[in-house]
Image (cartoon, rainbow, N blue to C red):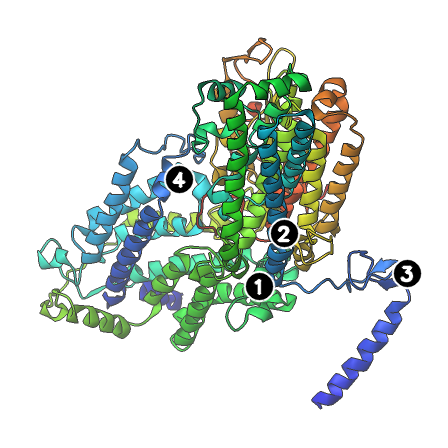
Amino acid sequence: MTGINNWITHLTKNHVSIFPLVVFRIIFGILMFFSTLRFILKGWVHDLYEVPTYFFTYYGFDWVSPLPNPFMYVLFILLLIACIFIIFGLFYRTNTVLFFLIFTYIELIDKTNYLNHYYFISLISLLLILLPANSYFSLDTYFGICKRKKTIKAWQINILKLQIGFVYFFAGISKLNYHWLFEGQPLINWLKHQSDFPIIGKLLLYDFTAYLFSWTSAIFDIFIFFLLINKRSRLISYFVAFIFHIMTAIMFPIGVFPYVMIASTLIFFNDNFHKKIIGFISKYSLLKSNNFSEEKTNYQTKTNSILKVFLIGFFTLQIFLPLRFMLYPGKLFWTEQGYRFSWRVMLIEKAGYSQFYIHEPKMDRKMLIQNRDFLTPQQEKMMSTQPDMILQYAHYLSKTFKDSSLVESNGEMIKMGTNPKVTAEITVSLFNKGSRKFIDSEKNLSEIKRGFGNKEWILDYEN
Amino acid sequence: MITRFFKFLYVFSALFIIQSCKKSGCTDPEALNYNIEAQKDDNSCLYEDYDKLSLLTNLADNYIIPSLDAYKNKIVTLNTHVDSFIENPSISNLTLIRTKWEDALLNWQDIGFLDFGPSEYILLRKQTNTFPIDTTELNNFISLADWNLGYSSSYDSKGLQALDYLLFKPGHTDNELITYFQNNENAKNYLKALAEDLNQNINYVSDQWISYREDFINDFEVTPSNLSTNSQGSSISNVINALCLHYEFYVRRGKVGLPLGVFNGFSQLELPELVECYYSGKSTQNLVRSVNSLRKYVSGSSYLNNDNGLGLDDYMNFVNAQQNSQQLSTVIDNQFLTILDELNNINGSLGEEIINNKSKMTQTYQELQQLVPYIKVDMTSALGVLITYQDNDGD
């Protein structure tokens, strides 16, 4: 027992160097600054938050909605400013809180734009609020806003490692499925379009390559955390991770995600490495790390029990979320019940085509809806394969037509009533095995409640 | 040791092949090594060797450029006959100009779905074949002798469909039509302007293709970060997006769905005045031609002599795209054939058929509809192309 206790103390309460955390703060700030800037410059603030008339909110977060023009841009500018403050470690706590709240708020607006790495950034920024990453090599210490520390408690670094470990590990676990391992899906299909890749292009055409990539990446994801925490395998495993992420960055349109992982994984390296980085930066900046006189740090002897409970809850939830799909019947990739927030990255190849109908109450005649009158192409595409979004859209249509009167081309007046019926014919193709019927096209979707219950109106995959 | 191993492997596989020849082999008639005696497919089918450069080169040199040229020639001929008609508005010249117009419109159906690159840049489809025609505006143009065909607001008063109206003007016998043109200098000028406008547009596109061809086959639009994937802006993506868009919105919806009333609210009341060639009644032949050309284009056939070359079908086979455990390319081709079968049973114009035989047309529409998910979902997803007009990260 004492062995385990010692080990836990070693991982949590031991005093360790603050360098890795400080470097993490700076790199995180810089990366977020550039990825936010990229987002603005690509015009996505306009495309994703100003163009759509409807937004697919998360269940329980329906109160989140985009701010009116031009305040979305204000939010993004605030993000940029927060990043700069985080980089320099000025008013660190306020700015991490600000970053976390704004970033998460933006991501909650529309699940069309859900990406695992946005979720990752939300989690990391939440953790950063709790960590004293400004206690060294920062303007906060320079101006005496907070005390200078050269060492911190071990948990304050290990918690970030654990978070990164969670991402990799569950990404690996989620690859342990039949399609990924035994059909090489979806890589087998994606790689065939990559024949012009430098040097290895022609190799990508062989099915064998897809299987090799599938298995290697599954093994890589599952074990990389354990290899990174081990001193002897750290360098080589980081090198492998680097190559892996660079390859995915070149092959697939996954934006900044690979770079975020490459940068954040640096935290696994030892103090000396980070000390050198800080030394390197201070050579070219006004902040001189060696100017800081060392102060005897004064540790709180009592661990904050609220914090402890919070963190245990935080990680327990992260174990539950990726596994919650097991509570639902049916095939995960088909129903996508319990799919998000589970580190399932590039696992699925799915495309759909949907036709929605609104019915008039008197004679149950139906009218075809032009989806593009209500949704952006991207929203339509995401909605057509994801049942919770299908339901939301159906409710939105029903609400839009509720209590309205429509005049037909023959002059007939049609009253829509209080809760117009909505049905949909949807075909979906999973892993390019051919499109097939996705949901019960007779079902009145406007009557179905949203929620986490099983959606029995999704047709079985084997049908 | 290694050589011995390979020798073993060679003998072993040879035995295996001899063994399997007896009953199983390639059962896909589309494949190069189709074995007519084979009863059981052993996944040995070989298809034409696929590579993107050859595919794009074939599409450009054997379909796109010849089809643009053919259409251009028809427009040139049309212009000549418009000139002689204006000089001498006679019944025989009217008949001639109508025939030449009919030819040009049929040829237009071969290139309507090539709306990317130069064509997309000048909105060739909108400028050439927008319907229905705004006859009020058109008649105002003529009576006031005041028009500017370059304005996008004039697009629904010009193009081949404006000719459909002018050359088959409702309420006019042929003789009355001749009189109309004889006594109306403005109408003559407008006719001339329409033909010249068509000429100018196709000339631009055809000229641009001389230099655009290189970009097209070499896929220059790609960004360094996604090399030659079929990302947005790449040639494959352009080809497929233009194809799907044209089929879904301008063939299925525009040529049949809208006039049939599928999109007309709850009543689904037919709107036959929305058909293509409403005034001449030449709608059926144009629909048939357009489906035929789409089929030809997908199969990579040569425009001039129908020789089969590398097409999107070969690309689909190359990635082994399936639909209901059949080759997707076969399923798509069969659907084209089913549609053409349906269309062959139509006797009159689409407008007449919609009124007299609505249930039959509804069935035809359903077959047209069925092709949409095949090309828009199955084909695009198999070829790694996104149907979206907005770029975004994925994961």
Same chain for the residues under marks 1 and 2 in the image: no
Question: Where residue A2 appears, x then y in whole percent?
Answer: 37, 67
Question: Visible in this render: residue B12?
Answer: yes
The residues bearing labels 1 and 4 have C-alpha atoms spaced at a distance of 32 Å
Mark 1: amino acid: Ser
Residue pointed to by mark 4? A48
Tell me the tag on residue A214: 1
Tell us which disc is closer to us: 4 or 2: 2
| Helix, strand or loop for disc 1 | helix
**A336 lies left or right of B96:** left
Residue pointed to by mark 2? B66
Query: Which residue shows up at 60% across the image and 64% down it?
Result: A210
Report if the CB atoms under discs 3 and 4 are less than 8 Å apart.
no
Question: Where residue B338 appears, x then y in whole percent?
Answer: 77, 38
**A97 lies left or right of A202:** left
Quarter of the image for the N terminus of chain B: give it: bottom right
Residue pointed to by mark 3? B37
Same chain for the residues under marks 3 and 2 in the image: yes
Mark 4: amino acid: Leu
Q: Earlier in the sequence, mark 1 or mark 4?
A: 4
The residues bearing labels 3 and 2 have C-alpha atoms spaced at a distance of 39 Å
Disc 4: CA contacts within 10 A as few (<14), some (14-19) or many (>=20)? many
Mark 2: amino acid: Pro
Placement of B302 over or under A405, stated as above or below: below
- B5 or B179, nearer to the observer: B179
Question: Where residue A344 appears, x then y in whole percent?
Answer: 51, 52
